[in-house]
Image: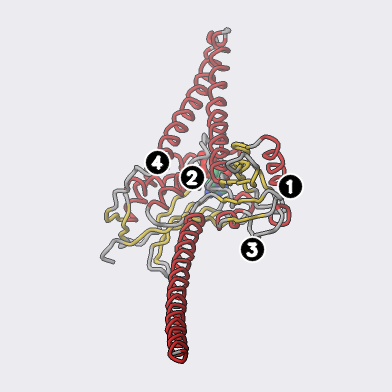
Amino acid sequence: MSQTVAIFSSLLALIFLVAWLRERRQSAREKATQDRELAEVKNRQLTTFAAIEARQQTLFNAMTEGVMVLREDGTVVLANEAFRGLFDLHSDIRDRSLMEAVRFHEVREVYDETLIAGQVQGRELKLPLLEDRTLHVNSAVVLDTRSQRQGMIMVFHDITRIKQLENTRREFVANVSHELRTPLSLIKGCVETLIDGAKDDRDATNKFLGTIEKHANRLTFLIEDLLTLSHLESGHLAMNLEDTELKATVDRVCEDLSRRAEKRGVRLSNNIPADLIVNADSNRLQQVLFNLIDNGIKYGGENGHVVIDAARNKEQNIEVRVADDGPGINWEAQSRLFERFFRADKARSREQGGTGLGLAIVKHIVQSHGGQVWVESEPGQGTRFHFTLRLRNAD
Ligand code: ADP
């Protein structure tokens, strides 16, 4: 009997053991499955985070503003590509201190100011060591939900070009005002002198009226040139390109200028080959030729010779040349000749009624035709202006 009980107990124990083992194996299997699932979720999360981070980084780098984020201790957390471009940085600046990363005390000053004020809005930074770059910066202290300081964000915008345009505009307005004021005050002076009694003297009256006419003309030319330039620069002026006979066009301009040339004893020679037909806006081309030939007459010296010729260049375009045998232009002045209101010889330009805009207009028109214009000159060796035009389409 007791043997039967013993066998039964052993059997029971064995059954329990098997059941326990099976349960353990089952729970180990379940745990493994759980671990695997957890790992997968984790992996998926990591992949999602990485994707989000990559997307943020891409967005961040796509921004035109330079952005830098700093920790509370002033070290760099991140900086986008635009920021690195603005400050000419070529290495990784993460984890560096602000001054190590960006060696400009001007930026450090904005940082300090932001720490005190909480934010800095629209401060301008001029960086002479970075090609005179001008940056506009906004910065703010970053706080967490408990208003604890976490760090700082600084956003930089490159406004160098805007500043340059502002300067050009300011200079232009100052120049125009000066150019208008000079003939106006001369006219006013003449009128006052006439009123004060000079009108009773016939010779004096004629002299003053002559001066008034000269300066009134100068004002008219100036306003006409300003309007032309403004039209050209607006980009709204379409060039009416058509087949244009070059030699005939030069003949027309020489005819218009013949009296002026005669007065100064200047000979005009049109050496353009008869068969050249260019693709150009005929009226605008006349304006270019008029300004260049007129300058040859005005500045080339009395009894001089102005020669106009043209030939195909190696790009198979037409290169037109207007050459005089006058005093020439010095090197320094040559590089600025096509700027508005620039004059190599101020007194001569004024005396000749020049507006200082002729060559700026020439440059605009030639460029609007897809061509180029340049000058060659040496003091005492005359001046040669060159510009290129396209041949008519079929050629
Ligand atoms: P302006 O109305 O004064 O003639 P331009 O723009 O036509 O203005 O020319 C600018 C300056 O370039 C002139 O004032 C003059 O000093 C110089 N210049 C232009 N053409 C010649 C030339 N053929 N020889 C010498 N100087 C010239």
Secondary element type, mark 4: helix
Q: Nearer the observer, disc 4 or disc 3?
A: 3
Q: What is the three-letter code of the residue carrying label 2? A: Ala
**Helix, strand or loop status at disc 1:** helix
Residue situated in front as seen by the camera: 179 or 161: 161
Viewer-closest of 365 and 212: 365
Q: Is label 2 in contact with label 4 (beta carbons under 8 Å)? A: no
Point 63% across, 52% down: residue? 330
Q: CA distance from mark 1 to mark 4?
A: 41 Å
Mark 4 or mark 3: whose residue is earlier in sequence: 3
Quadrant assignment, res 171: top right
Q: Nearer the viewer, mark 2 or mark 3?
A: 3
Give the residue pinned by disc 3. Answer: 92
Disc 4/disc 3 C-alpha distance (Å): 44 Å
Dot 1 alpha-carbon crowd within 10 angstroms: few under 14, some 14 to 19, many 20 or more? few
Kindly state the secondary structure of the residue where label 3 is placed.
Answer: loop
Q: Quadrant of residue 381?
A: bottom right
**Which of the numbered marks, if any, corresponds to residue 360?**
2
**Which residue does the numbered mark 1 point to in the structure image?**
105
Q: Is residue 344 above or below residue 174?
A: below
Q: Earlier in the sequence, mark 2 or mark 1?
A: 1
Of the numbered discs 2 and 4, the one sitting upstream in the chain is 4
For this rendering, which residue is in front, 132 or 8? 8
